[in-house]
Image (cartoon, grey):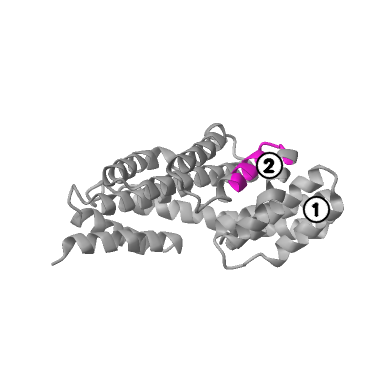
Amino acid sequence: GLTRLQALSAAWLAHMCYLRTDMAAMKAHLVQALALARPDDHTTLARANLVVAQALHAAARLDLALPWYSRARVHASKEGDDASISALMHNMAWLRATNMRQAVFCRATEVNEEVHALTSAESTLHFDLLVGSTSLGSLVPLLRAQILSLESKPSEALEIYEQYLVAAIRQGMGRLESSLLADQAWCRVQLGQNDDALSDARAAEARLDPVSHADDRAPAHSRLSQVFEMLGLSVDAKKHADQAGAAWLDHTQLQAEIIKLVGPLREDGTSKE
């Protein structure tokens, strides 16, 4: 009969299912959390709304995600939860960059996140400084580096990578190491640092996890294909281009599943007809 605890637990279970890309279970927990939560269960509603927002944003549907982001921010503010607001801003900034990478590497006709990605990252940094949060100190600089590399500014991006990449891995960003090293290699090869670029590329290859999230593998393979092509290693380039295509396909299929499952969801846990 502890419905508040049931709702809060369901919201966090939904978050965990999102992280492991079990979208059907995520939706089931979201439905329970949203249905059981009272209007003043701000902690529960902040978390549940954030999970929906992140999922839809990861599916490249920021238009659908924005109302959920807004409700998550309102509930977190009413609870005085600066940590959740910081997490929301970090996730939103990171997903903007993720969608920008997908658009660039998949040669989409429009890169809808490009205008806002760097601004979003900077806003996150300013908020963390305001509230004294230092737990994700390397995340924003590396986010900026990725955006700068996508904007064909390799010198600026490389300067950030050289300063923050090692520290970021130590702080728990190991699952992104391959992708970040591949991007660093691309910056180096753009600047004519071919030996260092090859060293970074081989290190990125060695750290690739074939069972990691597709949106982590896909940009790593895409960048490695570009690096090896510029280094004249056409066999390696083709291998990574093929693997990138397969990973991007997996990611787009996951995006379609998310839209199908949570796109129709209402804020009370019911679904639109």
Lower sequence index among marks 1 and 2: 2
Q: Is residue 158 left or right of residue 10?
A: right
Q: Is residue 240 above or below residue 96?
A: below
Q: Position of residue 245 (x, y in %)?
A: 64, 55
Q: Could you tell me which residue is drawn at 53 percent across and 40 percent down?
A: 121
Q: Main secondary structure of the magenta part?
A: helix
Q: Is residue 41 left or right of residue 182?
A: left
Q: Which residue is mark 1?
A: 197
As rendered, which of 32 and 181 lies closer to the eye?
A: 181
Residue 236 falls in image quadrant:
bottom right
Q: Is residue 43 left or right of residue 191?
A: left
Residue 142 is one of the magenta-drawn residues: yes
The number of discs equals: 2
Q: Which residue is mark 2?
A: 149
Residue 152 is one of the magenta-drawn residues: yes
Residue extending farthest to the left is 1
Q: Position of residue 251 (x, y in %)?
A: 53, 55
Q: Position of residue 112 (x, y in %)?
A: 53, 35
Amino acid under label 1? Answer: Ala
Q: Is residue 127 left or right of residue 272?
A: right
Residue span colored magenta: 141-154
Q: Is any part of residue 61 visible from this angle?
A: yes
As rendered, which of 19 and 109 lies closer to the eye?
A: 19
Amino acid under label 2? Answer: Ser
